[in-house]
Image (tube, rainbow, N blue to C red):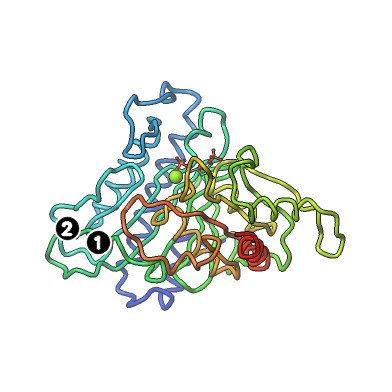
Amino acid sequence: MKTLGEFIVEKQHDFPHATGELTALISAIKLGAKVIHRDINKAGLVDILGTSGVENIQGEQQMKLDLFANEKLKSALKARGIVAGIASEEEDEFVIFEGVEDGKYVVLMDPLDGSSNIDVNVSVGTIFSIYHRITPTGTPVTEEDFMQPGTQQVAAGYVVYGSSTMLVYTTGHGVHAFTYDPSLGLFCLSQERMTFPPQGSTYSINEGYYSRFPKGVKRYIKFCQEDDEASRRPYTSRYIGSLVADFHRNLLKGGIYLYPSTAQYPNGKLRLLYECNPMAFLAEQAGGKASDGANRILELKPQTIHQRSPFFVGNTSMVDDVERFMRENP
Ligand code: AHM
Ligand code: MG
């Protein structure tokens, strides 16, 4: 058995500049994940469910656990003195960590993605994306530090709180997965260098919005449903409504996750900086692909912290197919 801590020490050379700081940063996320795991598992037992009555900047109701997860991760990250600031789905503006102006890193995160699933006991996740700040250390971070394209990510990952809790991350040297053993309080290595299976046969999309999808996506869905043994179609449809859990399943089994633009959300629903980019980095590191329908997600130039993007991620050949259908059906 190898723990996440041991694995990271062993892989020091995978960490750029190997000063131990990024290692400490991932361990802060690990600590936050343990606390969130504990409280999610208590969710049905204590009076922690229900909405907080507060709306976030996107006008969505925040669940109490979203706020809880945000606070826990924020304090774990601030305490290490390495992260100079964060941006979060749960914060309207980026947050400057006072007293940590020397920190070299910024973190963007969705502390509890898919949180509407909690009150029905379905998997949720934490997503994180780590960058070197570009403004000089010793000064407070600025918006510029958070507006870097996904190609600049130093590390990214997610924690899926499912039938077991798993942490999956990349530093650009493959994707590695660790399963949490609550009795020991340790994340143990369960898969090193994960890759998508060569051929995917699952598609994940909220088909309820079919009538609002672009023509190319509608055609692709029909393609998924056609009978063709050689390409393993019809594909299986699986949609949890929790990006992390849907992505995790597709990574293990092979598949594609789609959140296209819709009439209601012309830019899709998912947020580029703390949902699409980290998942795109992981997907590419696992031999997959991530696109907005026409362009590589990681190369999009961010304009605002909470900006959205259509998102197609999974097996390369499946994402290629969607892009082709979208090109051919403008
Ligand atoms: P959230 O960040 O508000 O939780 O929204 C993101 C979630 C994703 O996890 C999930 O894939 C998607 O929203 C589901 O949206 P929909 O209910 O429109 O299918
Ligand atoms: Mg989210």
| Quarter containing the C terminus | bottom right
Given contact means CB atoms under 8 Å apart, are the residues at marks 2 and 1 in contact? yes
| Quarter containing the N terminus | bottom right
In this picture, residue 227 sits left or right of residue 282: right
Give the spatial CA distance, label 2 vs label 1: 7 Å
Q: Which residue shows up at 25% across the image and 63% down it?
A: 145
Q: Which of the two residues, 113 or 311, is positioned nearer the viewer here?
A: 311
Q: Which residue shows up at 58% across the image and 68% down it?
A: 286
Question: Would residue 180 be visible to someone looking at this image?
Answer: no
**What x and y, as percent, mark residue 107?**
32, 57
Provide the secondary structure element on which disc 1 rests.
loop
Q: Earlier in the sequence, mark 2 or mark 1?
A: 1
Does the beta carbon at disc 2 come under 8 Å from ligand 2? no
Question: Would residue 101 be visible to someone looking at this image?
Answer: yes
In this picture, residue 4 sits left or right of residue 54: right
Report the image quarter containing ligand 2.
Answer: top left
Residue type at mark 1?
Ile
Q: Which residue shows up at 45% across the image and 53% down it?
A: 275
* Disc 1: which residue: 82
Quadrant assignment, res 134: bottom left
Q: Which mark is residue 283?
A: none
* Disc 2: which residue: 100
Residue type at mark 2?
Val
Q: Which residue shows up at 46% across the image and 54% down it?
A: 309
